[in-house]
């Protein structure tokens, strides 16, 4: 409502989330000896890209584990995220369209 | 202190009066009588603390704080207070009632036996919003944002990114409090977790955005139900927002509330001009944008979008329908209001001005439904079939139930694999060669809801194409509308 000084007070319509700046995880200098997760979001032809990545990793003798989301339309389930975090040092997610 | 009213009341008899009330001035000698009789009497005056003159004035309630918290309609009001709490009240002047209430006989000799009171100043329409903000504003928990004196409020809300591209109504405390009158639910009740930021959303936050959208308070229960339905895992608002596909939430309202709040289910039901249709759908989208943080170009990745993403909300034309309503089909009791959410594109028109048999009309429907998303793509996309009254008459006259129409359409919409594999018809889009021998349905089971909507003239129906169907994408979600 308008006060005597002519200012208007409104209510914040947002979720009032504080701006969160999350830092990127530290990048490994080398992937030698690391377990690499390849996560397919199950969108068409994402697997083509990941198959090729897997071949390239094999050339370098890097260990690869494959994962897939049940559907690309929803965030990865918590169980899948946990499984990847327990098994892998790094993860590469393929988005295709 | 009265825990309910939040004001300190002295024990004994409390009277609230104002000078500008003939009944209050009439009872002035009665108040004098009561005090003389030793009644522990406290008087508050709403307009002039020197009144009642014969008592040497009263406690000053010209800011109306006591009156507001006592929720007064009328002056004089006389209360009995025990241990700081009101235990009983009477209003106006009635000799017998006052005598019984105070235990003093022979009150107001010479006065008429009865006079009605006057309106309490707290009911003054020019004051009520201001009083509510002053004394009830604290129930609101949202952050207050002061706009500078020289800022145009509408422009300021655009600049803060809170608009969908059209002007929004500034959500001032008085407007939000009035909006909250539309529901019995507590402002701080959490009704949903809104994607994409997964923010807990209170009734109050929905009310703030409903104000901005232009809703009337009586629409709020519908908006609340729509927000609840949108923020379910089955409806999958997150995916619907993030997809490059062009769909958005379509809100279908069933039951008596649609008529009660003046929704349009007839001529131009999908179009402009009806406040409830326009603002309920808009309020849902503003909640997703502002509370959930779902903004185009950020998490909303739609390649094209569609105009329905401003608002797409309508009521089903139940009174003229030959069929059970969408909500009843989905398990809601007849006569109960509900919203159903569908992840839909914009509507496309379906013309058939010549069919007079249900068989022919169903074939027209099927031919058009086949083109949803792509004529060669089966199962992947849902569609809502919107049958208008003139087309529905063909089915009514021949006793075709909705179930009969649906099963005929299912049969007509079996696609031969040879027609829909990649390369068939000279079109690369399609299914892998392996499906060449298969027969596949255009729509999954449950993927083609049918509703009855529209004006009474026009042999046109409509198809609202859907999005990724079922568990991989979005399911229809129905929620009853509360109070």
Image: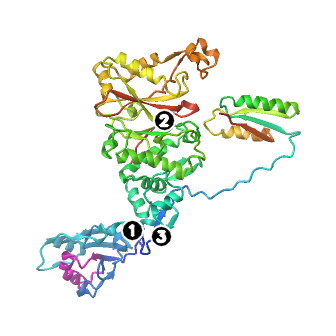
Chain hosting mark 1: B
Chain hosting mark 2: B
Q: Nearer the viewer, mark 1 or mark 3?
A: 3
Provide the residue designation for mark 2: B345
Residue B213: numbered disc: none
Residue B482 picture location, percent across and down:
40, 46
Residue B53 picture location, percent across and down:
24, 86
Provide the residue designation for mark 1: B5
As drawn, which residue projects farthest toward the front? B426
Mark 2 is surrounded, within 10 Å at the Cα level, by few (under 14), some (14 to 19) or many (20 or more) other residues, namely many
Q: Which residues are magenta?
A: B15-40
Left or right of B483 in this view: B230: right
Mark 3 is surrounded, within 10 Å at the Cα level, by few (under 14), some (14 to 19) or many (20 or more) other residues, namely few
Mark 2: which secondary structure? loop
Q: Are marks 1 and 2 on the same chain?
A: yes
Residue B417 image-quadrant placement: top right
Q: Residue at point 53% right, 53% down?
A: B290
Residue B150: numbered disc: 3
* Residue B269 shows in the view: yes
Q: Considering only order in the chain, which callout, 3 or 1, is on the residue closer to the N terminus?
A: 1
CA gap, disc 1 and disc 3? 38 Å
Q: Nearer the viewer, mark 2 or mark 3?
A: 3
Is B410 one of the magenta-colored residues?
A: no
Residue B316 picture location, percent across and down:
36, 35
Q: Are marks 1 and 3 in contact (CB under 8 Å)?
A: no
Mark 1: which secondary structure? loop
């Amino acid at each position: 409502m308008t006060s005597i000084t002519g200012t208007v007070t409104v209510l914040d319509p947002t979720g009032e989330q504080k701006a969160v700046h999350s830092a990127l995880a530290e990048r490994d200098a080398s992937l030698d000896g690391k377990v690499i997760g390849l996560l397919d979001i199950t969108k068409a032809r994402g697997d083509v890209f990941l198959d090729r990545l897997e071949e390239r990793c094999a050339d370098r003798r890097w260990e690869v584990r494959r994962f897939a989301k049940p559907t690309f339309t929803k965030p990865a389930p918590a169980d899948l995220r946990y499984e990847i975090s327990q098994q892998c040092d790094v993860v590469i997610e393929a988005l295709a369209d | 202190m009265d825990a309910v009213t939040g004001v300190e009341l002295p024990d004994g008899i409390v009277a609230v009066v104002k000078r500008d009330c003939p009944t209050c001035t009439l009872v002035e000698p009665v108040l004098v009588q009561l005090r003389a009789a030793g009644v522990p009497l406290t008087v508050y005056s709403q307009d002039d603390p020197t009144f009642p003159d014969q008592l040497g004035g009263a406690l000053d309630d010209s800011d109306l704080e006591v009156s507001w918290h006592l929720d007064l309609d009328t002056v004089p009001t006389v209360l009995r207070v025990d241990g700081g709490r009101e235990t009983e009240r009477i209003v106006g002047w009635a000799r017998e009632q006052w005598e019984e209430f105070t235990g003093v006989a022979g009150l107001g000799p010479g006065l008429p036996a009865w006079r009605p009171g006057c309106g309490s100043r707290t009911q003054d329409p020019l004051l009520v919003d201001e009083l509510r903000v002053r004394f009830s504003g604290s129930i609101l928990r949202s952050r207050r944002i002061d706009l500078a004196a020289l800022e145009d409020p509408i422009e300021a809300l655009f600049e803060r990114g809170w608009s969908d591209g059209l002007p929004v109504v500034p959500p001032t405390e008085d407007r939000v409090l009035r909006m909250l009158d539309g529901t019995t639910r507590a402002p701080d009740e959490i009704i949903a977790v809104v994607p994409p930021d997964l923010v807990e959303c209170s009734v109050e936050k929905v009310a703030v955005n409903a104000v901005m959208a232009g809703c009337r308070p009586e629409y709020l229960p519908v908006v609340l139900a729509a927000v609840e339905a949108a923020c379910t895992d089955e409806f999958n608002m997150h995916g619907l927002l993030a997809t490059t596909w062009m769909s958005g939430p379509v809100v279908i309202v069933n039951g008596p509330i649609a008529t009660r709040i003046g929704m349009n289910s007839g001529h131009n039901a999908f179009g402009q001009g009806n406040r409830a249709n326009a603002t309920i759908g808009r309020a849902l989208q503003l909640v997703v944008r502002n509370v959930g943080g779902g903004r185009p170009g950020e998490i909303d990745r739609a390649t094209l979008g569609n105009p329905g993403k401003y608002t797409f909300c309508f009521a089903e034309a139940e009174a003229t329908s030959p069929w059970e309503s969408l909500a009843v089909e989905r398990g809601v009791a007849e006569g109960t209001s509900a919203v159903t959410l569908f992840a839909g594109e914009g509507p496309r028109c379906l013309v058939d001005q010549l069919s007079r048999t249900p068989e022919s009309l169903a074939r027209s429907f099927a031919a058009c439904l086949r083109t949803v998303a792509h004529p060669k793509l089966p199962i992947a996309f849902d569609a809502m079939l919107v049958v208008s009254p003139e087309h529905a008459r063909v089915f009514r006259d021949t006793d075709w139930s909705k179930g009969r129409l649906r099963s005929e359409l299912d049969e007509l919409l079996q696609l031969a694999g040879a027609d829909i594999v990649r390369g068939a018809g000279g079109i690369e889009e399609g299914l892998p060669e392996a499906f060449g021998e298969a027969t596949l349905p255009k729509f999954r089971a449950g993927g083609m809801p049918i509703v009855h909507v529209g004006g009474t003239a026009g042999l046109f129906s409509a198809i609202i194409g859907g999005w990724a169907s079922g568990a991989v994408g979005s399911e229809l979600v129905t929620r009853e509308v509360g109070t």
